[in-house]
């Protein structure tokens, strides 16, 4: 049996193979990136090295073109998704190696970021909020954003810091503000959770039957930074107010865990809302107990301005 080397030599001598080989060589050497690489290493590279490395050079050409046409990590068509090719000299050949591309790095950073900002029933587009994108078109917005920046800058685990009780009319951007704070914290590897209170309360009612209530309440109680969105918009029973909300706030107060709130009510309005149970019973003392915990955990600030949802 002929040796593989002799077989290959015979193949190379065939005219049709030689024509295809020359065409491949021509295509590869026309690539601007390969031209530049050869020029930069002209003292090390000769024709024989190029011929020995033709397959790897051809691989580089195709993979790098895929990178040029790639719009996102999810659309990557390369052999190894999210990796971009580069050329290196290895002994007497040129090799094609791969490194993480910028889009893959950005994608993983975004996923890591998202994993740090947990949310319950908050739209994803809101979770991309940034403090720098908040319009500072009145004094209240300037004060709120300044407070938010200070909180993010100064917060450290275990440090006793007050969150915000952010109140104001419908659509002025209260949820956007707390989402932006959560994103800023995520950039510092600080986890947080944003909870839309009315939907959370509705889900807890159903959780009594599947025995997941304690698990869900504990997740909210223990997160490092909690944002309770739209408190006061729910129809809250005495049990929800005292045994659920009261327990969450009591735990966070004792553990010095920062807590943010948004509401259409100011503090007096929320106290009035919490005073009356679903049955219409007046329970001032119990409502006052909740309000004292909120005041301990958060600094009240009003957010004014026009309804920005009407502009979208």
Image (cartoon, rainbow, N blue to C red):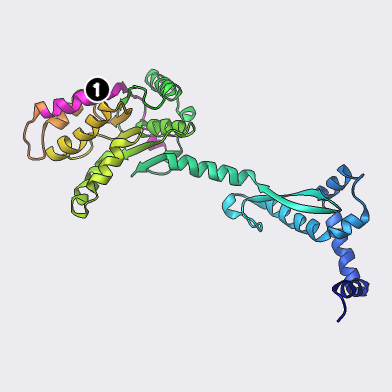
Magenta segment boundaries in residue numbering? 286-312
Say left or right for 41 vs 260.
right
- In this rendering, the answer to whether 103 lies above or below 47 is above
Say left or right for 4 vs 209.
right
Membership of 299 in magenta stretch = yes
Instruction: Tell me residue 228's x, y (percent).
Output: 30, 34
Q: Secondary structure at mark 1?
A: helix
Could you classify mark 1 by the number of other residues whose Cα lies within 10 Å: few (under 14), some (14-19), or many (20 or more)? some
Foreground: 298 or 231?
298
Foreground: 305 or 104?
104
Say left or right for 253 vs 66.
left
Name the residue that disc number 1 marks: 295
The answer to whether residue 3 shows anywhere in this view is yes
Foreground: 31 or 306?
31
Foreground: 292 or 167?
292
Membership of 10 in magenta stretch = no
């Amino acid at each position: 049996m002929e040796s593989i080397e002799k077989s290959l030599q015979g193949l190379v001598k065939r005219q049709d193979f030689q024509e295809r080989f020359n065409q491949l060589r021509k295509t590869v050497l026309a690539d601007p990136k390969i031209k530049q690489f050869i020029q930069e290493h002209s003292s090390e590279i000769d024709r024989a090295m190029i011929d020995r490395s033709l397959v790897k050079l051809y691989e580089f050409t195709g993979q790098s073109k895929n990178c040029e046409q790639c719009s996102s990590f999810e659309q990557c068509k390369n052999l190894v998704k999210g990796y971009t090719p580069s050329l290196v000299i290895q002994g007497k050949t040129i090799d094609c190696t791969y490194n993480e591309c910028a889009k893959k790095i950005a994608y993983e950073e975004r996923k890591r970021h998202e994993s740090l900002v947990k949310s319950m029933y908050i739209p994803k587009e809101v979770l991309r909020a940034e403090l720098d994108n908040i319009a500072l078109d009145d004094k209240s917005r300037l004060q709120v954003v300044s407070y938010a920046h200070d909180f993010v800058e100064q917060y450290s685990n275990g440090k006793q810091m007050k969150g915000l009780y952010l109140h104001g009319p419908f659509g002025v951007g209260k949820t956007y503000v707390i989402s932006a704070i959560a994103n800023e914290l995520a950039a510092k590897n600080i986890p947080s959770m944003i909870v839309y209170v009315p939907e959370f309360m509705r889900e807890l009612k159903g959780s009594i039957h599947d025995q997941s209530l304690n698990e869900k309440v504990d997740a909210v109680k223990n997160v490092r930074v909690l944002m309770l969105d739209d408190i006061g918009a729910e129809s809250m029973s005495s049990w929800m107010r005292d045994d659920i909300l009261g327990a969450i706030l009591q735990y966070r107060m004792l553990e010095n865990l920062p807590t943010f709130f948004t509401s259409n009510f100011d503090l007096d309005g929320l106290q009035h809302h919490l005073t009356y149970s679903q049955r219409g019973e007046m329970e001032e003392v119990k409502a006052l107990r909740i309000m004292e915990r909120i005041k301990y955990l958060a600094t009240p600030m009003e957010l004014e301005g026009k309804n920005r949802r009407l502009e979208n």
